[in-house]
Image: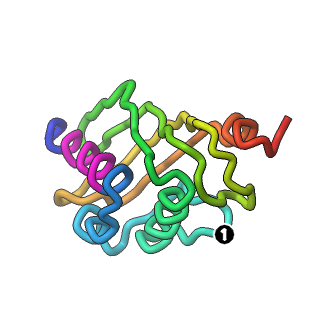
Amino acid sequence: MSEQNKALMRRFLREVLEGGNLALIDELYAPDFVNHGAPPGAAATREGLRGVITKIRAAIPDAKIRIDHLVAEGDMVVLNGALSGTHKGSLYGETPTGKQVESRSLSMHQVRGGQFVARWHFSNHAEFMKQLGAAK
């Protein structure tokens, strides 16, 4: 089960986050999915997750994911890594800078029946905003 859960995570990272296949969210995430790490203003549902990813992809269209650690045990899969790319679109109200940015994060997903049912996500938002020039 652990290897299947890792493969599910890799598929999400490569095909959805990097590849932009947002329709795949309906296959990978259960209808009753709960995003415990939803950013302010985003629904904690798979539709809310789709909206967040849409905004990220619009702001960083060349987004790439680096996997530093991918660990799975039982029904949980944990990713420690980073999203990086070029800031080409508005994000968090910041105008595009054209700068290379990186957002490190830690995500934990619970899997049931071959789909993600819950997500906890933590990122270094302050450092990311500093790269955009929004924080000192």
Left or right: 32, with 35 as reference point: left
Report x, y in % for residue 87: 60, 47
The type of residue carrying mark 1 is Gly
Q: Quadrant of the C terminus?
A: top right
Name the main secondary structure of what is drawn in magenta: helix
> Does 6 lie within the magenta span?
yes
Image quadrant where residue 113 sits = bottom left
Asked if the magenta segment contains residue 90, the reply would be no
Extent of the magenta region? 5-15
Residue 81 % position (x, y): 44, 32
In the image, residue 72 lies at what x, y percent? 27, 34
- Which sits in the foreground, 83 or 115? 83
Q: For the N terminus, which image quadrant? A: top left
Residue 105: where, in percent of width, then height? 52, 37
In the displayed structure image, the side of residue 2 where residue 51 appears, left or right: right
Q: Please, is residue 9 above or below residue 82 in the view? A: below
State left or right for residue 125 relative to residue 103: right
Residue at image x 32%, y 31%? 70
